Image: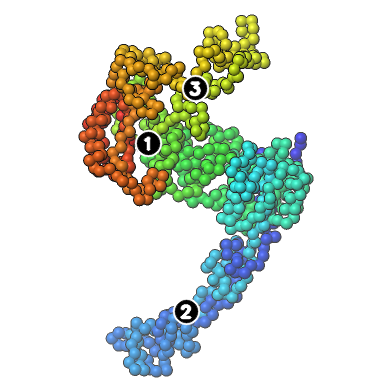
């Protein structure tokens, strides 16, 4: 289909079209405005003073009005004497008498009765503000194109001016469109929104931007993707407003009608701009007014607003300048500075790309990295430090490629650290506490190995890792030594990681470990079958591949993999008398591999509760000690702690105090609780003994709790010097962990 307007043009070409078409329209916005209301407006003409400022000769000091001839030859040794009638007292700003031509400062005189002694000779006009010293009547005091400032407002009044010609602000209308767009009030009123809907947030961004630019904008209701409704609103907006902005509908989808509306109501100037994000932007002339379609994605809207709408506002208000400078002003650029890319970046061919970047300085290098290139991501726009524009020729920007940054945020690089490493939420929780203390750090998620590699290359200040060495069973140490390559790195334990299974409230399936996920009785892998029913196999998928002369789908492959018979997940449940057991009596059993390993380690026997009989009724086996506690059991199997389900215990919690200096409502009432006496609390010697004993039994983790553990005096030195820690490290296969 042939079109009569340019498509996919550069940003500079798009602005040239708008500038050429609407440059003369600025005269339409010339108006007379009262001087106080004209603040920050641009003058449309030169301003001439209507009066002299000041309009009389005035004294510039406190002193005496004199004739300069009466002070000739005066000095401190031979003062001149001026009698009564030849001098007059003057306050600062007072009008000078016609007979006087100078003013003597009080400091240079003395009074003896009516006789004035002058210690300094004066010249004509000394200490006198002459007529029109500031401004002469008819003088140009402000020129066309200048912005009205508070100083000019004051000068206008002194010069006898009450109104000045300025460029008024054009009236702008924004029309949001889209069936998926939900208005602000409705969005906030619902706790959950249906899939495929988004909040109408673009109007908030546009309105806030206009306020920062000193302009106003009206926002229309959200319109559906309906051709006739959109056409009606655009036509009405072009009659009542000076600029019309249409949100979305510029693409080539079935529900995108903006191009049809523009073609039916006016002239399309261009469609599509070679910029990322913001490619679907387009502009038209309707009723002699500029109408611009903003892409729907937030970042695309922002780029079009900065690069085309703001320069158009500047053009119509008499403040047009170089496009790049206007864009920098629209963004709120504080300064421009060079930086190096921290990672390689690929840019589309022939497209000018806008990157939202985070920055940090490591050594003598200022690094920048893109947060994201997605057009729909608002967080990256709010989080970024700067905007970087990559030219269309920048296809593959290698690492350490120098780019120019437009800084939108002031950053103290001497107090900002760069983190690279594992994607752990705990890292992000540290940012605010660090900032409260006057420092800052930026983070990049690159994985544990990537963080250590970046640290070894000198591309960050610290990294986080949790890497398991399967050969030794230890965490991090082997990898740190490998990447450090002999350099001394400080290691800091910041947090512990807790991993597990998230279940529904109340745990209706009774899931406690991974073994429970594999039990058919819990109905997880397959729904429970009715008694007497056999679950048939699924039919082979249509178009399944042929093997051995017959069709075999996915489940047929599983059939072969399991050595014949029915697929494991779809085998009918047996319902004979041997399997009629009460669920509440069933207990999980050890995995066969774990059972064999435990029996090999303890030939004397172990206790393994049966799933078909109550464990309490089983006789104690040789070499096993039992201690009943509710429904659970603690057993010591020849130097190892094993619970009633056959699981090895490697975790002990030790309470060092019951006192606390807080009164958290979920833990302690305001009046506190009755605390134990000092003699009833474990001594440090007792704690050390218990740690050594438990460590020999295979315990690999001790957690010290309270109360508030740090309330107890000497706890930290105990951790640092305790022999129990050394015993724990010696006896445990994994790194010993102490936590408070």
Q: Residues within 10 Å of mark 3 (few under 14, many from 20)?
A: few
Q: What residue is at 55 percent from the left and 52 percent from the top?
A: 329
Tell me if I can see residue 565 in this picture: yes
Q: What is the number of callouts on the image?
A: 3
Q: Quadrant of residue 110?
A: bottom left
Q: Which secondary structure lies at badge 2?
A: strand
The foreground one among 606 and 353 is 606
| Residue at 43 percent of width and 35 percent of height | 424
Residue annotated with mark 1: 495
In this view, the mark in front (2 or 3)? 3
Residue 583, which numbered label? 3
Q: Earlier in the sequence, mark 2 or mark 3?
A: 2
Choose mark 1 or mark 2, whichever is in front. 1
- In the rendered structure, the answer to whether residue 37 lies left or right of residue 659 reads right
Q: Quadrant of the N terminus?
A: top right
Mark 2 → mark 3, Cα distance in angstroms? 106 Å
Q: Position of residue 684 (x, y in %)?
A: 23, 36
Identify whether 658 is placed above or below 242.
above
- Percent across and percent down for residue 178 are 68, 43
N-term-proximal mark, 1 vs 3: 1
């Amino acid at each position: 289909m042939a079109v009569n307007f340019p498509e996919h043009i550069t940003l500079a070409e798009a602005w040239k079209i708008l500038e050429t078409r609407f440059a003369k329209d600025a005269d339409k916005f010339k108006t007379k405005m009262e001087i106080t209301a004209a603040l920050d407006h641009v003058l449309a003409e030169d301003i001439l003073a209507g009066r002299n400022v000041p309009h009389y000769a005035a004294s510039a000091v406190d002193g005496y009005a004199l004739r300069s001839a009466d002070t000739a030859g005066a000095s401190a040794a031979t003062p001149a004497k001026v009698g009564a009638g030849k001098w007059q007292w003057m306050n600062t700003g007072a009008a000078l008498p016609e007979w006087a031509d100078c003013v003597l400062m009080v400091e240079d005189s003395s009074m003896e009765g009516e006789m004035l002694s002058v210690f300094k000779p004066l010249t004509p006009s000394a200490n006198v503000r002459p007529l029109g010293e500031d401004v002469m009547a008819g003088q140009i005091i402000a020129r066309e194109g200048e912005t009205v400032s508070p100083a000019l407002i004051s000068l206008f009044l002194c010069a006898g001016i009450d109104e000045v010609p300025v460029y008024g602000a054009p009236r702008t209308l924004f029309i949001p469109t889209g069936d998926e767009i939900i208005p602000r009030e409705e969005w906030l009123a619902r706790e959950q929104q249906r899939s495929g809907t988004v909040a109408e947030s673009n109007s908030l961004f546009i309105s806030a931007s206009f306020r920062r630019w000193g302009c106003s904008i009206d926002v229309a209701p959200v319109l559906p993707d309906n051709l006739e409704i959109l056409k009606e609103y655009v036509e009405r907006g072009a009659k009542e407003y000076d600029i019309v902005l249409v949100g979305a509908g510029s693409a080539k989808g079935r529900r995108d009608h903006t191009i049809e509306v523009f073609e039916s109501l006016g002239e399309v100037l261009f469609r599509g701009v070679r910029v990322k994000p913001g490619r679907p932007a387009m502009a038209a002339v309707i009723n002699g007014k500029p109408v611009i379609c903003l892409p729907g994605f937030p970042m695309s809207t922002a780029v079009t607003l900065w690069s085309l709408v703001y320069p158009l506002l500047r053009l119509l208000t008499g403040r047009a300048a170089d496009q790049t400078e206007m864009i920098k002003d629209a963004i709120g650029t504080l300064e421009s500075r060079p930086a190096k890319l921290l990672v390689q970046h690929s840019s589309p061919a022939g497209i000018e790309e806008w990157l939202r970047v985070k920055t940090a300085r490591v050594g003598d290098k200022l690094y920048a990295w893109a947060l994201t290139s997605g057009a729909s991501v608002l967080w990256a726009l709010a989080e970024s430090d700067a905007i970087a524009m990559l030219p269309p020729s920048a296809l593959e920007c290698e690492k350490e490629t120098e780019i120019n940054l437009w800084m939108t945020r002031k950053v103290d690089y001497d107090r900002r650290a760069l983190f690279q490493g594992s994607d752990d939420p705990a890292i992000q929780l540290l940012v605010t506490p660090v900032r409260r203390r006057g420092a800052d750090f930026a983070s990049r998620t690159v994985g544990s190995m990537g963080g250590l590699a970046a640290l070894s290359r000198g591309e960050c200040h610290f990294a986080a890792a949790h890497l398991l060495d399967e050969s030794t069973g230890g965490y991090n140490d082997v990898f740190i030594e490998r990447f450090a390559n002999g350099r001394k790195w400080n290691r800091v334990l910041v947090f512990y990681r807790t991993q597990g299974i998230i279940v529904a409230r109340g745990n209706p399936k009774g899931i406690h470990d991974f073994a429970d996920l594999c039990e058919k009785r819990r109905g997880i892998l397959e729904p429970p079958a009715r008694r007497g029913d056999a679950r048939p196999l699924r039919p082979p998928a249509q178009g399944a591949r042929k093997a051995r002369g017959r069709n075999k789908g996915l489940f047929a492959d599983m059939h072969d993999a399991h050595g014949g018979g029915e697929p494991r997940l779809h085998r009918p449940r047996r319902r004979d008398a041997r399997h009629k057991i009460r669920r509440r009596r069933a207990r999980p059993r050890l995995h066969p591999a774990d059972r064999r390993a435990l029996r090999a380690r303890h030939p004397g026997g172990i206790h393994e509760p049966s799933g078909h009989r109550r464990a309490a009724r089983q006789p104690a086996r040789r070499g096993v000690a039992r201690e009943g506690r509710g429904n659970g059991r603690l057993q010591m199997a020849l130097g190892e702690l094993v619970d009633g389900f056959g699981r090895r215990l490697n975790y002990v919690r030790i309470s060092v105090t019951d006192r606390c200096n807080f009164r958290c409502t979920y833990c302690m009432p305001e009046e506190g609780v009755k605390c134990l006496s000092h003699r009833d609390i474990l001594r440090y010697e007792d704690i050390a003994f218990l740690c050594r004993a438990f460590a020999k039994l295979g315990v690999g983790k001790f957690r010290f709790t309270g109360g508030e553990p740090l309330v107890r005096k000497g706890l930290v030195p105990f951790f640092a010097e305790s022999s129990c820690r050394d015993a724990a490290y010696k006896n445990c296969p994994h790194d010993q962990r102490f936590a408070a």
